[in-house]
Image (cartoon, rainbow, N blue to C red):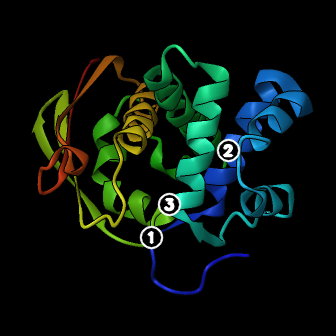
Amino acid sequence: MAMDNAAARIKGSVLITRINLLMKQGGAGRLQQVLQRLPPADRKILEGVIMPIGWYPLELNLRLDAAIADALSPRDRNKAFVEMGRASAEENLTGPHHVFIRKGDPHFLLSHAPEIYRLYYAVGARSYEKTGPRGGVLRTMGAESVTEADCLTIIGWYERAIEMSGGRDVRITHSKCRARGNGHCEYHCAWEA
């Protein structure tokens, strides 16, 4: 069911981390509770075999994220989106993407933002600019589908990734967002050593 064209796509590994989060949060019952909120075509894909390196429609991931937020945190959906990002970072950076973690050096991870972006998204690009010993700016340009919810998962992902790299008291501000009419998304990252 993976897509072959260049439409907005996301790697299957993202979908897998969402499903794993649901299983940790309440097992098969929680997973079914979320899947029942989705259209039958989405359920068919998510109940089948998801290939980690396969490409899937980004819209499928956005619908899944919305259903998870509604189920896990209906009163504070923003918190749920950040937590999904954190869980994704935890799973991927202790697994297949562990090479991006260098203890005590969040800049090492952040400097690989362009490569990390390509591991998840088919369209667009991300850059990183170091702004000081404990800070920098990530910019996402050219992404085809941008929602504030997806941006919150990115904030959660980088927040946890910086922590895993040794940063403490991580703060990420989302100063620009295409979903709010800006030309690109911008995330200012700061942390303590």
How crowded is the residue under tag 3: few (<14 C-alpha within 10 Å), some, or many (20+)? some
Give the CA distance from mark 3 to mark 2.
12 Å
Examine the rendered structure and indicate whether residue 185 appears above or below residue 12.
above
Image quadrant in which you'd find residue 70? top right
How far, Cα to Cα, is label 3 from label 1?
A: 11 Å
Counting residues from the N terminus, which is met first, the one under dot 3 or under dot 1? 1
The image shows residue 55 at horizontal and vertical percentages of 60, 72
Choose between 97 and 59: the one closer to the eye: 59
Can you tell which mark lies on residue 120? 3
* Of the two numbered discs 3 and 1 in the rendering, the one whose residue sits closer to the viewer: 1
Residue that badge 2 annotates = 17
Marks 3 and 2 in Cβ contact (< 8 Å): no
Horizontally, residue 4 falls left or right of residue 153, namely right
Q: Report the side of 111 relative to 176 (left or right).
A: right
- Relative to 175, 140 lies left or right: right
Element type at mark 1: loop
* N-term mark: 3 or 2: 2
Residue position for label 1 = 8
From this view, report whether residue 182 is shown above or below residue 73. Answer: below
